[in-house]
Image (cartoon, rainbow, N blue to C red):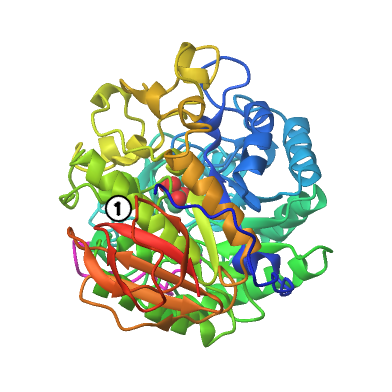
């Protein structure tokens, strides 16, 4: 029996939707450069996304989150925004964005857009003027310009390093050509950090929020939400391994208490709009408790929880992640979020394919094993209370592309780290829609990153209507999740006793069992199977009868 997707009607009526659509929504992340190319220039765009919205509707997601599509020189794939109110011409026009929002709404899906408040592009008008006009420019204070240390200011103002490698400071030239002050950039030099102590910065972002809310968007994903406020005086850290401290330790760079006042002011704006507009924070904080502060009732609605993404394929570790994550958000009355893949991380089909050496090129590993575990992990995630974020292509079981030629790589961290880091392009390779044809249906031209051999066999066309395919597994899971009240809702799970290597949890009317071991393990039959990522047999016995849960398998059951 494979995969087991029961057609029998559910016996339990769906619960009334609780207030707060985001609390259990399935949100699909669209990476605009790589989703669909409407004009054949090799780069995905907004008209391309619009043309594929019916596919997302059929997949069964509630909302989409679009990575930045704003005017940008693309030094960091759009996270270097030159104009927050304009669309990058390569990706479309403002009219295209409005049409995309309108059509998504017509199909019953919400739209979340990225907001990048920590930094701008160095081509942003404010920064260009700050640099060109030199010391004394009123635009200087909107960024962090500082004199250097050393006899002639030749050393950076402090010891902070960039997340992308190298110092977090770049020296400027004065208008007369002499060496000038340094400016702070926690990411690439093309991404100068705003100084959020300046009222003009705060005012500007409140206005940007309104600009997009007025265009009907349903929410924002807030980039680097933990970074806006820096400790007063920008003190040294005294350590060189700062990159590893991102989100794991308290530092003067990240997660300063001052950020919360900003989010409270944003929440007031969101709440003035009808239709439950939300914000989800990308906030790397040292503990689950610190992360929960971003989602207090008067702040943002959700924060990404990357704990599941960081967990190995190990029942005990996953159980701890689930418990800690649920407990943290419960204390502030927020809902949990789950994510297994995104545009910054090795895709989970490859993460689970074998060990990935830290800070080195990803390894392809055992692809069959990786995919099997990835499918089991997805079913586990979709059974947890809270909302789930899916990353485009994971519904096709796409692996990380581990053998991209170095000259094709565009991740700014790749060059800045001396090619020892910055391997994010491997999860950004354009989507395969068709088995054959130019760029496998991504567009009529090429694709900005080369698609690997065999990409067409993973395409939507190849998987559509194949009951064994990953695409059909996702569709079945999302359809069941919509119909079944035990999935997604609430804020707790009840763990059942299970042998080592197995996770078994119960929600009202529902049981989820996952075997992370590499051999079948026996559990008491929980009830009637609904869905499974791999073949299961002997499911007809009475509840409690011995059942052999296959290796690397999740089964959903009604109970
Ligand atoms: C987090 C985004 O997800 C990542 O892609 C980007 O490079 C950094 N923030 C900087 O904006």
Give x and y (percent) for residue 556: 45, 64
In the image, 114 versus 198, the foreground residue is: 114
* Residue 504 inside the magenta-drawn segment: no
Question: Does 450 appear above or below 502?
Answer: above
Residue marked by disc 1? 373
> Which region of the structure is painted magenta?
228-241
Q: Does residue 406 appear to the left or right of 437 in the view shown?
A: left
Q: For the view shown, which residue lies furthest in the bottom direction?
A: 331
Task: Please name the residue shown 46% across and 78% down the image.
Answer: 506
Horizontal and vertical percent position of residue 146:
41, 57
Rendered view: 257 above or below 240: below
Q: Residue furthest front?
A: 541
- Residue 232 magenta: yes
Residue 146 appears in view: no
Q: Is residue 468 above or below residue 557?
A: above
Q: Visible in this render: residue 434?
A: yes
């Amino acid at each position: 029996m494979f995969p087991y997707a029961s057609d029998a009607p559910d016996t339990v009526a769906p619960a009334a939707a609780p207030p707060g659509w985001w609390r259990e929504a399935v949100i699909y992340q669209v990476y605009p450069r790589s989703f669909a190319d409407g004009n054949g220039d090799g780069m995905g765009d907004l008209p391309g996304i619009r043309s594929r919205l019916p596919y997302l509707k059929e997949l069964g997601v509630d909302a989409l989150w679009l990575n930045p599509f704003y005017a940008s020189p693309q030094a960091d794939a759009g996270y270097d925004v030159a104009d927050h109110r304009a669309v990058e011409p390569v990706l479309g026009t403002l009219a295209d964005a409005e049409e995309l929002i309108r059509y998504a709404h017509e199909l019953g899906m919400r739209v979340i857009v990225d907001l990048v408040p920590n930094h701008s592009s160095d081509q942003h008008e404010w920064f260009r003027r700050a640099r060109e006009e030199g010391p004394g420019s009123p635009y200087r204070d909107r960024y962090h310009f500082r004199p250097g240390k050393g006899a002639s200011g030749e050393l950076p103002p402090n010891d902070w390093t960039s997340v992308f490698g190298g110092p977090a400071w770049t020296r400027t030239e004065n208008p007369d050509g002499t060496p000038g002050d340094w400016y702070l950039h926690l990411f690439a030099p093309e991404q100068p950090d705003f100084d959020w102590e300046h009222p003009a910065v705060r005012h500007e972002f409140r206005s940007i929020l309104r600009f997009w809310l007025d265009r009907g968007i349903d929410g924002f994903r807030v980039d680097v939400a933990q970074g806006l406020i820096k400790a007063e005086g920008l003190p040294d850290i005294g350590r060189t391994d700062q990159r590893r401290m991102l989100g794991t330790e308290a530092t003067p760079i990240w997660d300063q208490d001052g950020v919360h006042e900003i989010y409270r002011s944003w929440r007031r704006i969101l709440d003035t709009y009808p239709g439950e507009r939300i914000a989800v924070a990308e906030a790397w904080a040292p503990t689950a408790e610190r992360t929960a502060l971003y989602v207090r009732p008067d702040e943002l609605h959700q924060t990404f929880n990357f704990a599941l993404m960081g967990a190995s394929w190990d029942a005990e570790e996953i159980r701890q992640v689930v418990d800690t994550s649920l407990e943290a958000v419960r204390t502030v009355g927020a809902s949990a979020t789950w994510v297994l893949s995104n545009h910054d991380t090795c895709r989970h089909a490859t993460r689970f394919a074998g060990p990935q050496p830290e800070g080195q090129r990803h390894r392809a590993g055992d692809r069959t094993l990786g995919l099997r575990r990835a499918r089991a992990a997805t079913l586990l995630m979709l059974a947890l209370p809270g909302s789930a974020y899916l990353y485009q292509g994971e519904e096709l079981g796409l692996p990380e592309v581990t053998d991209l030629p170095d000259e094709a790589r565009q991740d700014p961290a790749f060059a800045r780290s001396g090619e020892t880091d910055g391997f994010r392009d491997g999860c950004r390779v354009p989507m395969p829609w068709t088995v054959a044809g130019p760029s496998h249906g991504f567009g009529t031209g090429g694709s900005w990153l080369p698609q690997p051999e065999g990409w067409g066999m993973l395409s939507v066309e190849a998987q559509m209507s194949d009951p064994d395919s990953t695409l059909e597994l996702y569709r079945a899971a999302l359809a069941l999740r919509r119909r079944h009240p035990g999935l997604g809702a609430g804020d707790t799970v009840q763990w059942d006793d299970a042998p080592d290597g197995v996770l078994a949890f119960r929600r009202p009317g529902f049981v989820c069992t996952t075997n992370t071991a590499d051999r079948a393990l026996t559990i008491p039959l929980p009830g009637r199977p609904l869905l499974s990522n791999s073949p299961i047999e002997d499911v007809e016995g009475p509840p409690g009868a011995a059942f052999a849960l296959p290796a690397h398998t999740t089964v959903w059951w009604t109970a």
